[in-house]
Image (cartoon, rainbow, N blue to C red):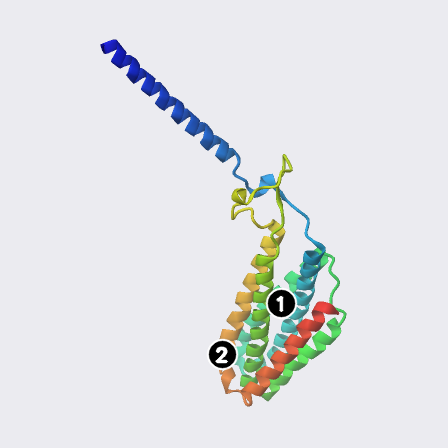
Amino acid sequence: MLSKRSAIQASRQLSSSRVALEGSKKKARSKAHEYIPENVEYGSLSKAQKAFLDRVVRVDQAGELGANYIYMGQYAVLSTKFPHLKPVLQHMWDQEIHHHDTFNKLQHERRVRPSLLTPLWKIGAIGIGAGTALISKEAAMACTVAVETVIGGHYNQQLRVLMNQFNIPIYDKETKRMLTPEEITKEIETSPELADLKSTISTFRDDELEHLDTAVEHDADKAVPYMLLTETIKLICRGAIWTAERI
């Protein structure tokens, strides 16, 4: 009787061990199929996606060039008339120079042609910056509100497209098998190139909105006539964006 009970216990222990072993193997197999950027590769972009990325780089380079020259014009006028504003203006201008340099680099790396109207953007931007600064400090700040509102909104629109319309196929680098949705984790769902671009645009968007807040803090709403000034500059900026995307 005792030996029979011992045999049953031994059988149960063996069964438990098998279950544990199978569970361990299953976990190991599951772990072996966890993908990281190093063991996946991404499918090609469609012609429409490539064209969109080229437009993004072209228009953002042109936009940041414009912002750079607007702040150049504002700084030239306001830094002498209002010395206390020099650090504020220099900080915003330095960020725009960084934005412009970044998109210049992307433009060369991706071999994207610049906007054919680049000389016009420079002349127009420095004219807007210096012109509004000559009107008043408040007019210059209202100009910043208008420009950064349009640029911030434009960056948001680009991010929405990049997040919703760039779901390209992902493959196991070794077997070339396309991964199933269940196998795609947050870490690999976006290619490094697109992830970097989204991060850049998101960071620059936040910088532009910071400039908008700074302008509001420095009495942008006291510009006369505020609505006419800001809406006119917004209209000019939207027209420049539309043109830079295409020409």
**Which residue in the rendered view is the most extreme toward the right?**
116
Q: CA distance from mark 1 to mark 2?
A: 22 Å
Secondary structure, mark 2, is helix
Secondary structure, mark 1, is helix
Instruction: Report the quarter where the N terminus lies.
Output: top left
Residue 84 percent across, percent down from the top left: 51, 79
Residue occupying image coordinates x 54% and y 83%: 82
Residue 97: which disc?
1
Q: Evaluate whether residue 129 shows in this view.
A: no
Residue occupying image coordinates x 52% and y 74%: 212
Residue occupying image coordinates x 75% and y 72%: 117
Residue 245 percent across, percent down from the top left: 70, 68
**Which residue in the rendered view is the most extreme toward the left?**
1
Residue 8 percent across, percent down from the top left: 29, 16
Seen in the image, is 17 located left or right of residue 42? left
Q: Residues within 10 Å of mark 2 (few under 14, many from 20)?
A: some
Seen in the image, is 245 located left or right of residue 39? right
Q: Amino acid at mark 2?
A: Val
Q: Evaluate whether residue 145 shows in this view.
A: yes
Q: Amino acid at mark 1?
A: Ile
**106 vs 96: above or below:** above
Residue 90 percent across, percent down from the top left: 56, 72
**Considering only order in the chain, which callout, 2 or 1, is on the residue closer to the N terminus?**
1
